[in-house]
């Protein structure tokens, strides 16, 4: 599920430009290249942007593995080591469980290689929603653009009666 104007995975100026793929064992692998625009302290990634990158990676598991629209309910991020500007964070996300509309996911982020040092880990709860959530709270223009980009109609998203 890709929306071209998404700050995390889209093509917007200043966004994270993250890519995610579903791999073996139903793991979602994401990459986040840390640029100077992402720094907080001199030469280091901003913690809030790292949390944002994990929100994107964790959310992509719900979208790519379950094919269900969901929104973040809770996000917990543990920062284990600094993430320098110029590094690439390799994030591996797994689906931990589903209970009704609740989707539990977790992820580890490693520096500069899939087997690099563990820098960040996170856990999240996502809540499955219907398209009505976006029509009630989002902009009609953005929703139309998303439907065109995703190649899906509104009816395709109404999965919860």
Image (cartoon, rainbow, N blue to C red):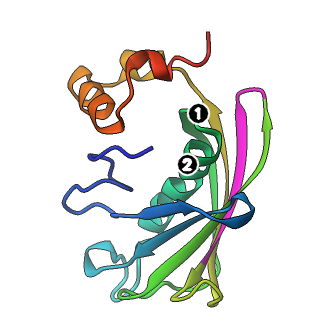
Q: From the viewer's perspective, is residue 52 above or below residue 98?
A: below
Crowding around mark 2 (Cα neighbors within 10 Å: few <14, some 14 to 19, many 20+) is many
| Front-most of residues 62 and 15 | 62
- Secondary structure found at label 1: loop
Residue drawn at the location 45% of the way across and 43% of the way down: 1
What percent of the width, then of the height, locates residue 46? 41, 72
On residue 68, which mark appears? 1
Residue 59: assigned label: 2
Q: Quadrant of the C terminus?
A: top right
Where residue 39 sits, quadrant-wise, is: bottom left
Residue closer to the observer: 46 or 57: 57
Q: Nearer the viewer, mark 1 or mark 2?
A: 1
Secondary structure, magenta segment, majority class:
strand
| Left or right of residue 68, residue 143 in this image | left
Could you tell whether 15 is left or right of 63 in the image? left
- The magenta segment is 100-109
- Residue drawn at x 58%, y 19% is 159
Q: Is residue 147 magenta?
A: no
């Amino acid at each position: 599920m890709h929306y071209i104007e998404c700050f995390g995975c889209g093509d917007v100026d200043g966004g994270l430009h993250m890519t995610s793929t579903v791999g073996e064992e139903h793991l979602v692998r994401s990459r986040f290249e840390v640029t100077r625009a992402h720094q907080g302290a001199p030469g280091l990634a901003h913690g809030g942007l790292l949390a944002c990158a994990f929100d994107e990676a964790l959310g992509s598991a719900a979208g790519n593995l379950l094919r269900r629209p969901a929104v973040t309910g809770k996000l917990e991020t543990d920062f284990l080591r600094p993430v320098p500007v110029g590094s690439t964070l390799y994030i591996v996300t797994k689906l931990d469980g589903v209970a009704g509309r609740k989707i539990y996911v977790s992820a580890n982020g490693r520096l500069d290689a899939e087997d690099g040092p563990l820098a960040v880990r996170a856990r999240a709860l996502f809540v499955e929603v219907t398209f009505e959530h976006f029509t009630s709270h989002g902009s009609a223009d953005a929703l139309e653009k998303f439907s065109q980009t995703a190649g899906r109609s509104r009816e395709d998203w109404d999965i919860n009666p």
